[in-house]
Amino acid sequence: MTVNGLLDAAKVLEDQAAGRVPPKALVLSGALALDTLKHRGQAGRDLLDAVAGLEALAKGITIDLDEAGRARATYLAKVIREAAALPR
């Protein structure tokens, strides 16, 4: 897992929040980075929510977000960016 992968995950969520379709490469990179945190036991509730969302996108599932969903995606992107800034 790399910091770049976490930043990709944050970008995917920001794209989702803005109503854009994120590039598949970013989805896969971000999903892998978050999944690694999950399997290392380093993911709290917020990161687990992000894992589930990116895994769904990686599987080709379309997620249409309402206003609350867009706000949640924005918040999760912030949480992931904070996690990326932590020392490894």
Image (tube, helix red, strand yellow):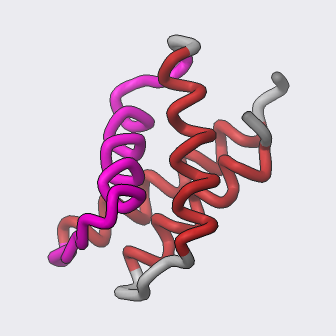
x, y (%) of residue 5? 70, 49
x, y (%) of residue 87? 84, 26
Query: Which quadrant of the figure contains the C terminus?
Result: top right
x, y (%) of residue 44? 42, 24
Q: Is residue 49 magenta?
A: yes
Q: Is residue 29 above or below residue 63?
A: above
Q: Image check: 61 left or right of 30?
A: left
Q: Is residue 45 above or below residue 56?
A: above
Q: Is residue 61 magenta?
A: yes
Residue ranking furthest to the front: 59
x, y (%) of residue 70? 30, 71
| Res 74 → quadrant | bottom left
Magenta extent:
42-67
Residue ranking furthest to the top: 41
Query: Which quadrant of the figure contains the N terminus?
Result: top right
Q: Image check: 34 left or right of 85?
A: left
Residue for point 69% across, 56% down: 7
Residue for point 65% across, 60% down: 8
